Amino acid sequence: MHPAIEIGGEFNFIPNLSGNPLTVTDGLNSRAYESFYAYDGGFSAKVFPFFTHPDWRYEPYLITGYHWNRLIPKASGDEFKGKSIFGGAGVMIPWWKPLYWDFRFTYQHTGYDSVQFLSGEGDISGVTHNSYVLSAGLSYRFL
């Protein structure tokens, strides 16, 4: 598109989450969850404000994006579905072209709007999670 803009797709997997018990009920049955795993995926856009400096080894950027989220209580068969928006800043460092080290710090707001509970599905409201994420990974540039 342009040397200052990059559009990307992402997938994240978090194998172990825990916290205060989360209780769900349908009026007759109740379950309390304490251990989860999660995954999300979606799209992001990076803006490289210093693209006019091609001699720099590091490529700082700003990022924003949208993800579809799943939060799964372990050993339950249940699932929470939601969406998140995020934004932050990062830096890409060339490793072996087309691979780049990608370090970023983001703020993410996630809202869960449905739950699969005991083989049924229903809507929920008011279940949100705000997080600050420090991440490191590899990015592959196709172009």
Image (tube, helix red, strand yellow):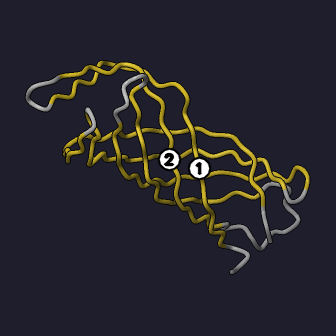
SS type, badge 2? strand
Closer to us: 138 or 91: 138
Q: Amino acid at mark 1?
A: Phe
Residue 51, horizontal then vertical, whole percent? 74, 70
Crowdedness of circle 1 by 10 Å Cα count: few (<14), some, many (20+)? few
Q: CA distance from mark 1 to mark 2?
A: 6 Å
User: Residues at badges 1 and 2 in contact (C-beta under 8 Å)?
Assistant: yes
Report the residue that reaches farthest toward the left: 27
Above or below, 70 against 92 in this view is above
Which of the 4 quarters of the picture holds residue 5?
A: bottom right
Quadrant location of the N terminus in the rendered image: bottom right
| Relative to 96, 81 lies left or right | left
Residue that mark 1 sits on: 11
Above or below, 34 against 24 in this view is above
In the image, what residue occupies the spot 9% across and 26% down?
A: 28
Quadrant location of the C terminus in the rendered image: bottom right
Residue 16, horizontal then vertical, whole percent? 52, 25
Above or below, 101 against 32 in this view is below
Which of the 4 quarters of the picture holds residue 142?
A: bottom right
Closer to us: 37 or 2: 37
Report the residue that reaches farthest toward the front: 119
In the image, what residue occupies the spot 26% across and 19% down?
A: 32
SS type, badge 1? strand
In the image, what residue occupies the spot 68% across and 40% down?
A: 136
Residue that mark 2 sits on: 40
Residue 63, horizontal then vertical, whole percent? 57, 59
Residue 20, horizontal then vertical, whole percent? 32, 18
Q: Amino acid at mark 2?
A: Asp
How many numbered circles are shown?
2
| Relative to 33, 50 lies left or right | right
